[in-house]
Image (cartoon, helix red, strand yellow):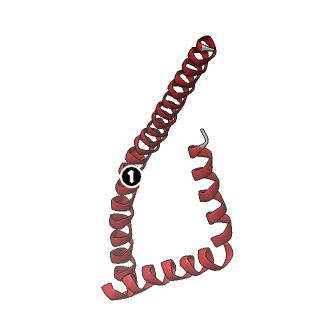
Amino acid sequence: MEDHAKMIESLLEDVAGYGKTSFELAKLQAFDKASDIVSTLIPHTAVIFLLTVFMLFLNLGLAFWLGDILGNTFFGFFAVAGFYFIAGLILHFFMHKWIKKVICNYIIRSVYK
């Protein structure tokens, strides 16, 4: 009888050890995914920032150039703003679902990588 009790006690210790190990493994896998996502986001953020600065100066130059052509500086800014208004409407009404699907698929792919 004592032999059975020792076997059961040993089995319970093994199960407890397995549970602790499984928990540690899940924790390490979560840290791995989080660090992978953060390490991917930091370079993307830097590139997006640089592209934003580039687009800002490009749009300012284009607005001043169009204003020079149209005869008044603010007409160039109105033309650039009108272009972005029309582009925003097109994106919102015709490409919203496609963009949402692409972003969702990218996030899901990066989580399950």
Q: Position of residue 47 (x, y in %)?
A: 39, 50
95 or 108: which is nearer to us?
108
Residue 79 drawn at (x, y percent): 45, 83
In this rendered view, identify the residue nearer to me: 21 or 78.
21
- Residue found 57% across the figure and 45% down from its top: 111
Image quarter for residue 61?
bottom left
- Residue 72 horizontal/vertical position (percent): 32, 88
Under circle 1, the secondary element is helix
The residue drawn where x is 49% and y is 77% is: 84
Residue positioned 55% across, 21% down in the render:
9
- Nearer to the camera, 59 or 69: 59
Q: How many marks?
A: 1
Q: Is residue 77 left or right of residue 93?
A: left
Instruction: Report whether 71 appears left or right of 79.
Output: left
Position of 27 relative to 45 (above/below) = above
Q: Which residue is mark 1?
A: 45
Q: Residue at x 59, y 18 (%)?
A: 5
- Up/down of 45 relative to 61, above or below: above
Q: Nearer the viewer, residue 85 or 37?
A: 37
Q: Quadrant of the C terminus?
A: top right
Residue 45 is situated, as x and y percent measured from the top left of the image, at 39, 52
> On the picture, is 84 further left or further right than 106?
left
Furthest toward the front, the residue is 1
Crowd class of label 1 (few under 14; some 14 to 19; many from 20; radius 10 Å): few
- Which amino acid lies under the numbered mark 1 shown in the image of this protein? Thr
